[in-house]
Image (cartoon, rainbow, N blue to C red):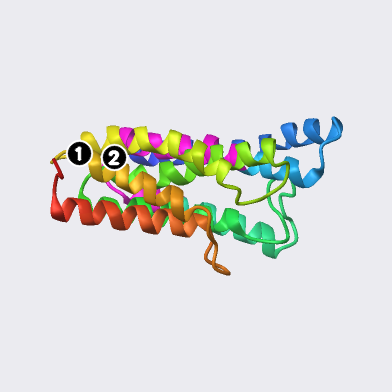
Amino acid sequence: MSISPQFAWAVGLSLYTMAVLFLTLIPYRAMVARGMEPIRAVYYNRKIVHMMAGGVGSLMVPLVFTDPWYPLIAGLLLTLFTYLAHRTGLRLYWFQTPENTNDVKFALMWAASVSALWWLLGDPWLAVLPALYMAFGDGVTGIARNALIRRRSKDPVGNVFMLIVCVPMGWIIGGNADPAIPEWGVISAIVATIVERYEFGPIDDNVLITLSASAVLLLGTLIGPLA
């Protein structure tokens, strides 16, 4: 009995993601050993996970999958794993905090946005664009703030770095859509960068980035190219 290539990729990428989650214990211990506050090391690690797990996983989706079911199921399983880590008291303290479950929301919004946009738009690259903003854009934002402000904050300096990262992705991926909508890709990047600064109770920046960028892309495909 042969194994589906998509299933094999789903298993392989899931194992890769789990490896990233647990291997970030190494930089956490190194940062704390050098005298860094544990909470700052946690936030550095969270952004490493954003980029190395969420970002790399997002880039792989259009390359190895032909339908959104596998990314959806894998993302939901990761959501369940991170949620249970919080609820059972086995919190992965090197990137999870007792103050919030933003890592759970990241996994949930990744799964929801990638699969929903793929079904709605039929374009896997457009489908992963909001997830790329959430992974790489918000990732570099947090690293910049942690390095320059030295605490978790919503300082606009982070959004400058996010914009620099997200606009080229929006332009390139939007430009390769059919029809090409690079301007809408840039608009989605700008909107995602703006809303990253806000949180409304349980609705954190992971939710706002993916929802707002997805809405812009859906609007863009309905209206069509602006130039």
Image mark for residue 177: 1
Residue at left 20%, top 48%? 122
Image position, residue 29 (x, y; %): 80, 35
Most common SS among magenta residues: helix
| In this view, 151 is above or below 203 | above
Residue 33 found in image quarter:
top right
Residue at image coords 35%, 32%: 168
The tag earlier along the polypeptide, 1 or 2, is 2
Tell me if residue 198 can be seen. yes
Rendering quarter of residue 23: top right
Position in image of residue 117 (x %, y %): 29, 53
Question: Which contiguous range is marked in magenta?
Answer: 47-74
Question: Viewer-proximal residue, 34 or 49?
Answer: 34
The quarter of the image holding the N terminus is top left
Q: Is residue 71 magenta?
A: yes
Q: Say which residue appears at 57% left-offset and 41% top-offset.
A: 157
Between residue 99 and residue 23, name the one nearer to us.
99
Helix, strand or loop at disc 2? helix
Image position of 212 (left or right of 174): right
- Label 2 belongs to which residue? 125
Residues 156 and 91: in front is 156
Mark 1 neighbour density, 10 Å: few (under 14) some (14–19) many (20 or more): some
Instruction: Say which amino acid is labelled 2.
Output: Trp
Residue in the picture at 28% in, 32% down: 172
Farthest residue to the bottom: give it. Answer: 201
